[in-house]
Amino acid sequence: MALRRTIKIAIRIAIAAGAVALAVVALRPDPIAVETVKVRRAHMQTVIEAEGKTRVRDRYVLAAPVAGRLQRIVLRRGDEVRSGAVVARIEPAPIQPLDARERAETEARIAAALARQREAEALVVRAETECGQARRERERAERLVESGDISRQEYDRLCDAEYSCLRTLDAVRFRASAAVSEVDAARAALLALERAGARDASPPVEVRAPAAGSVLRVIEESERVVAAGAPLLEVSNPGRLEIIVDVLSTEAVRIAPGAAMIIDGWGGDEMLRAQVRLVEPSAFTKVSALGVEEQRVYVIGDLMDAPGRLGDGFRLGAKIVVWEGEGVLQAPQSALFRRGDGWAAFVADAGRARLREVATGRRGGFDVEILGGLQEGEDLIMHPSGRLVDGARILIRAAAF
């Protein structure tokens, strides 16, 4: 009798426990579906994105050395010209004998042109010395990178520095050539002024191209009387392009000469390489599309591999690399959220969401550097919702990547 009563009580207890278990299971919230991504180590870059345009690096505006009648210029945009080729002729206007003041002014212009010529020649010597040093450093690095004593990144930096130095050497050589042309033009002007008399007695003054290149613009095409110093046409080498972008002054202080630039949005499929040559020392005020006044700074870069399809004034997008590192522990920014004054994230651990305080560093694109709180290989929950709390049950739907 007692045994039967004990069995009945046990059965009732088992039924009650099963009912309670079924109620708990029925009332328990469903696991939250989440996507996860692993904390990983990889190469990371911090970039500043900006829009800019191309610009010919060596632009020469040829002006009339004397006042007189300009003969019609037959050149057109895109025409090739050789260094020293005659691009315009001017018949000097009738002049009176040269007085002392005019002679002094003309001789002063010749002296100034000679000073610019000497300065340009000194810059050529300096650039040749710097290029020689850059070449020797690159040659030493070439031997060291084969033995593993320096990194490939450092070797690439020295190669880019040598390339940039050679481009600078070409520029100062063009400047020296232009300075010689300025001296010749100033002396021709003095010669024309010394020849008093009728216009027919003075031969036409020839305007010559200071360097080989193409005609960018013909300013005075038709025959007309021009004053001394009037611009006639622009000549440049369209293959020597540079990049000009404007960035906020607060971003410009993070950019150093020699920084890498990645060029996209120029119309082609491939990315182009460039290098920052100059961050201009003065800013300017620009009104944004929202009507806010901003202080911006021009950043000038040299194209390393300019395609022939680019020309002067073409629009493009630029990413300026201000920092980069290898083997950086990083995670997507979309997996982090603000918690108080810091950052936090949820880690997927055995079907549960575990809250972690995270210390962050630099940001690059869509990722952020992890300084503490997470380990390599851990699964982070992407786009954490407000339903997630520490210890919540989760169902991993799929990995983000």
Image: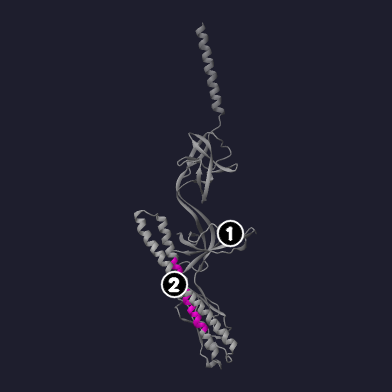
Dot 1, how many residues are within 10 Å of its Cα: few (below 14), some (14-19), or many (20+)? some
Magenta highlight range? 165-186
Magenta: main secondary structure equals: helix
Q: Residue at x 55, y 88 (%)?
A: 193
Dot 2, how many residues are within 10 Å of its Cα: few (below 14), some (14-19), or many (20+)? some
Q: Is residue 176 above or below residue 138?
A: below
In the foreground, 2 or 273 = 273
Whole-percent x, y for residue 22 in the image = 54, 24
Q: Is residue 194 above or below residue 164?
A: below
Is any part of residue 268 visible from this angle? no
Badge 1 element? helix
Whole-percent x, y for residue 271 in the image = 46, 59
Q: Residue beneath label 1, please?
A: 249
Query: Which amino acid, by three-letter code, is at mark 1?
Result: Ser
Q: Residue at x 51, y 78 (%)?
A: 115
Give the Cα distance between marks 1 and 2: 34 Å
Q: Quadrant of residue 384?
A: top right
Q: Residue beneath label 2, please?
A: 125
Q: Is residue 67 above or below residue 247?
A: below
Are the residues tagged 1 and 2 within 8 Å (C-beta)? no
